[in-house]
Amino acid sequence: MRIRLLIASVGLWIINTAVWSQSAVCFQIETSKPCQTMEYFSASDAWSMQFIGLWPEEKQNQIADWLFSTENDENGQPKGIGLSLWRFNVGAGSAEQGKASEISSPWMRTECFLKPDGTYDWSKQQGQRNFLKLAKERGVNKFLAFLNSPPVFYTQNGLATNTGRGGTANLKLDCYKKYACFLADVVQGVEKHDGIEFDYICPFNEPDGHWNWVGPKQEGCPATNREIARTVRLLSKEFVDRKVDTQILVNESSDYRCMFSTHMTDWQRGYQIQSFFRPDSVETYLGDLPNVPRLIVGHGYWTNTPLNALRGIRSQLRDTLDKYKVSFWQTEICIMSNDEEIGGGGGFDPTMKTALYVARMIHHDIVYAQAKSWQWWRAIGEDYKDGLLRAYTDNDFRNGRVEDSKLMWVLGNYSRFIRPGAVRLAISAFDNAGKLIHEGDTDQKGLMCSAYKNVDGTYVVVLINYANEDKSFSVGKVIGKKIKWRVYRTSDREGENLKPIEKVKGGQVSRIPARSVITLFSE
């Protein structure tokens, strides 16, 4: 079956569906052509929640509602963006080292559960653990633990930052087994003390990133594919021996191009899909481990501009994923210096300027790379475009305030309505003469459209209007029926944060304002 959408460049609020402008485009959502099954939308607690999780409870609750709630207020307004997975940063111990950690900002240092004598202190990382519980209270039941560095007691230089060592793992040769045991201890310890089970764990973060080799900036550890494979095999066995169900994910790649080729690195850190999931890559193959899914995770940094690269790199990634039958999650992204269209990463931006830019990223990751999960970097940042929320803290970090952003709410246009298990549906586009328009669902400077069917049978359509002028759309029948749609809009207008705007009957055409994102949710 097909759902028909009409996109016209006329500025009418409601028009008869029989009226077609010369520039009209017909989108047909192919309900008989399912694409990937969606899993989670997420963000991480790094590094802010270690402090904000100790703020007054009313402030914690407001932040948790914004991030995790799937409830509506009395006016039908969503209280939050309904993230369905939460990322927990397992610390390496730079906080206990203080200035000796060579990480200048206390904001970017982390505590470690492990103590120098080999015992554990389960009072550590309390602020982050508080947010694990706040997420669970609001319905989040999937959790991912990730590490930027092994504990400082296991690293070759005694630090959680690499300090110019080069591209090999900052892990003592006799500590691989200890590191695997530490990871298993953390998974079991957090479940025992907090009632939170980690469904996934990533033992390395951006091991291929050249920034990781320089330091000192933040916790980080490079590694070659062989070093990663050795660690994952040991961890897999440790989980099996302890009957731990947590799945192990690889590789939190710093750049998509490292996943299917090499980029600013060499063969030892590139070709990761082939290295980990092609059986003849004997020294690095992980596809035979019981707790390593046939899934690779990576970060979208440095691949979002120019526009031909935004599409092309993801298409190349998808080709390699398909060749080796591997699934993909996008697990970290924020704005970087090369994102010049919106002024680079410096300075927090609460407006639609950054929000639309990121919405375009989300669309391309889902449609072209067929990401099953999409995860932003930090839930809360400072004066940089790396947080969904902006924190203003006291000098001792014990209190402060947090400001929301259009970026957070635009992510909610996806995360609040596309729930785990939803199936993305293919879209075809036709002109007035009925001729197929190649990639007509993606006008990178105009309208971008994607559609989904949730497990409960509800349909979701997300429309991005990147253009500076209003557009119009209509939704036709679904399986022979005219659906009533509730429209939720995020724009720079005051109060339009997933705001329920109107109900649209199938066959009507409604306006999507310039520079806005809307979600149509079937009732």
Image (cartoon, helix red, strand yellow):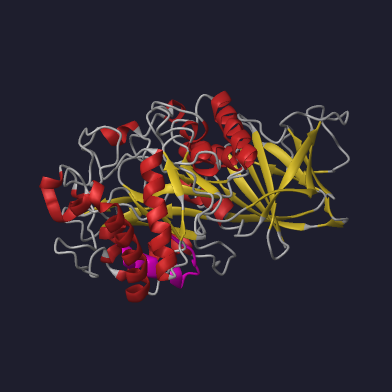
Q: Quadrant of residue 416?
A: bottom right
Q: Is residue 142 magenta?
A: yes
Residue 109 coordinates in the image, percent (x, y): 22, 50
Residue 123 x/y as whole percent: 23, 70
Q: Is residue 481 above or below residue 339?
A: below
Nearer to us in this view, 129 or 515: 129
- Residue at (82% x, 27% y) in the render: 22
In which quadrant of the rendered view does residue 269 lie? top left
From the image, which quarter does the C terminus lie in? bottom right
Viewer can see residue 325: yes
Query: Which region of the structure is painted magenta?
Result: 128-144
Q: Residue furthest left?
A: 100
Classify residue 9 by image quadrant.
top right
Residue 302 position in % (x across, y down): 44, 31
In front here: 127 or 395?
A: 127
Left or right: 294 in relation to 143: right
Q: Is residue 259 left or right of residue 238?
A: right
487 shown above or below 211:
below
Q: Residue 272's x, y, as percent?
A: 48, 38
The number of callouts visible is 0
Q: Residue at x 39, y 75 (%)?
A: 195
Res 55 seen here: no
Residue 117, magenta (yes or no): no
